[in-house]
Structure formats: C-alpha cells, structure tokens
Image (spheres, helix red, strand yellow):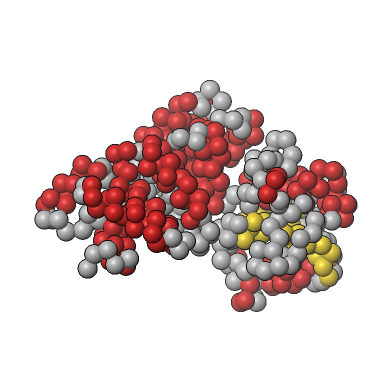
Amino acid sequence: MGVFLHVVLFPGGDELKCRVAVQRAAEDKALEVRLDDCRWHLFEKGPAVLLNDSCCGYEALAEKLSGVLSCPVMVLYIYDDDYWGYFLYQDGAELDRFAALPDYFEAGSPPDRPGNGPLVARLFGAESAALEPYLLPWQEERMGSCAREGDQAVIGDSWQLADFMGALGFDYDRLCPPAPEPKGPPDPRQATPVTPAELRQEVTKGHGRPVDTPILPDALNDRPYALKRAEEVRDIAAQAVELVEQMHYQSALPLLTEALKAHPDRAGLYLLRAFCWSQLEGLMTGLSRKPDMDRDLGKALELEPDNVMALRARCPTAGTTTRYQRHIVELTRLIELDEENQDYHLVSRAYRYHWVGDDEAAKADLQRVLERGKIWTVDLTYLCQELGMIH
C-alpha cells in the first residue's frame, strides 16, 4: 500500500469539543479511526489532529464531525501517495472540496476544478493570494515546480499538502507524538546488514541453495552512516547531533525540524531526521512514520540525487501499489551507481516491471542476473519460476 493520510483542521474550534467529536466519529467502524494512534496539536488558529494510518474518512468524516461542531472542519488527505485534497464542511454541509489530480478514478472523478481560495482564506484567516497557487489541479506543464517560493514539495508531489497546511497557519511537523524516550538501548527492529561477500559464502556452504536477499546498509538502518552525516550538520544543529549520538532520537526530532526550517538546503538534516524516525518505528505508537521517512529521503535526494544510501532506503523490498514507477527509476540509477550490488537491484527492478505488467523487461533483468551467476536468492528463484524461466 502507498501512503493514505488524514489530517483534520478545526479553525477557531474548541479543543475539547473537537476531541469529543472525533471520539464520537470513531464509533462509526466504517471510518476505522483508532483514537490511541491519533496525534493532536493546538495551533494558534485552532486544534488539528493527524489520524491513524488505516483511517478511511474523506467526506463522510468531514460531514460527521461538522454536524456536531460550530467551527469549520477541513479533512485533508493524501490518497495512495498519488495526490492530495480536502473536504471542507460546516454545520454538516459541504462548503468546498479540492483534489490535486483530477480524473484519477474516471473522467470527472475527482472533478477538474480549483478550490475556493477566497472562501478558505476567510475561514482560516489567511491571505487568498497565498492559498490559490495550491488550489489549482495539477497540470503536466507545471509538474516539478513549486506553487510558492520556499515550498518543500513540488507540484506533482502529494506532500504539497504540508506546504498548503503551512499557508493556512498549521505546521504539519508539529503533529508529533508526545512519547517518552525509550528506556535502555533502542531495539533496531531490523536485521543486521549482510555484505555480498558474506552472502556468497552462505551460498557456497548451502551448496547452491537459494538464500534470503541481504539487507544492504542504507540511510535508515546504518548508524555509522547516520553519525557521519550528523557530524556534517553539527555546526547548525549541535544539540540535535549530541542527542542522536546518545540515541535520544525522540528528543532530537523537534530540534532537527527547527534546523530544517532555517537550513532547508542541508541534505544531512533530512537524512538524520529520517534515521531518527526509523529508529523509533514501532516503539512509540501504532502510527507508522514511513511517510515521514519517505518525504525526508525524497528531499535529501533532490539535493543529492546520486546518494546510494538514500536510494537504497527509498527502494524497499516490499513495494507499494503506486511507487513502482518511481522505484524503477531509482533502481535504474542504483544499478549504475552501486555496481557491487547491481544483481540485487536488477532482481528488485524485475519485480517492479512484473508488477506494472512489463514481463519482458522483467525477464531481461533476470536473464542478466542468471548469466552473471553471482547470486542465487529466494526472490530470484521465485520470480524466475513465476515467469516460466526455470522449473
């Protein structure tokens, strides 16, 4: 699955009443709201909540919440990491809706129309001119550019949602869990990276039997690499670096976020924040921080497009339904840059080709691996069998 995300903004709302409204909405099992996994923050303009990963709210949630509150309710969402949008309701009635990528499901769904900038500006106490650049459906000729100077995400990136929130006066990064530091050494929850040489030894000992694909060191699982990148940003985030060195990752996160606001051009800060998220994954709440890791790695790669460690981290073994094409592009670059491990990357790219329906390209990648004869993994064996290349 890709990223499915829901954020609810309550401009001018009373925090207690808004929390009660969300609790009542959670009684509707169809919405799949898990209260323990929701994260709240009270902004100057009103409360906001980041809902749990599996929430399925959209307009039904906006209608339900607005029916018991006097303030406007905006349900912002990212759909499968393909696009973002919102539903704006008040008193149980729809005021406006917007989707960045029209005709996604079929012609007219979502509709190809801009959001109502003046209305949203009035309800949120914002400048209409600052909002309207975000409220235009994406067009091919505008892809890759920013709606406004200083944005973190470009047009075509679903994380433009965070920039839009900022223009409304709600900082997405402040929706962080108030969790305590984990006690004792952190559990990495990950297998120890295995080198290709070690893998070849295992193949020899196993008399050629398929072995598991190794977990290569990357920007999310390699602490020495994270500490190396931390040293590069000590001049602008000294306290955060010290906390990372002490494994106090939760405490380091807000400091890294503040440093990024002042220095958005420093890739090391994005990589260090992504590493902190990865070390805390599964240790605090049931809410996954993989979307945050993916966003930070993406920003780092914009600054360092040939960063092998970041590229490895962005191409996980488990693919998502909408990131296959991106994975293909990034794996192609990895095949060029990471020659020692190119056979593993070829197998990974073959899976992506297979998942998007291009079995000929998948077979070509697998054939290259078979002809070289350097690896023999379970993943290679399985896909070769599925495509009828071995029996």
What is the x, y in percent for residue 161? 68, 51
What is the x, y in percent for residue 159? 63, 49
Give the farthest residue toward the top: 235
Asked if 10 appears above or below 234 in the picture, the reply is: below
Horizontally, residue 318 falls left or right of residue 53, namely left
Q: Quadrant of the C terminus?
A: bottom left
Q: Residue at x 54, y 52 (%)?
A: 291
Horizontally, residue 87 falls left or right of residue 358, namely right
Horizontally, residue 238 falls left or right of residue 6, namely left
Q: Residue at x 26, y 45 (%)?
A: 194
What is the x, y in percent for residue 171? 69, 45
Foreground residue, 354 or 277?
354
Horizontally, residue 358 falls left or right of residue 93, namely left
Can residue 35 be seen by looking at this rendering?
yes
Can residue 170 be seen by looking at this rendering?
no
Foreground residue, 296 or 115?
115
What is the x, y in percent for residue 226? 42, 35
Q: Residue at x 46, y 51 (%)?
A: 327
Task: Please state the total of marks drawn on the protein image.
Answer: 0
In which quarter of the view is residue 102 placed? Answer: bottom right
Q: Residue at x 71, y 52 (%)?
A: 138
Foreground residue, 38 or 145?
145
Foreground residue, 249 or 290?
290
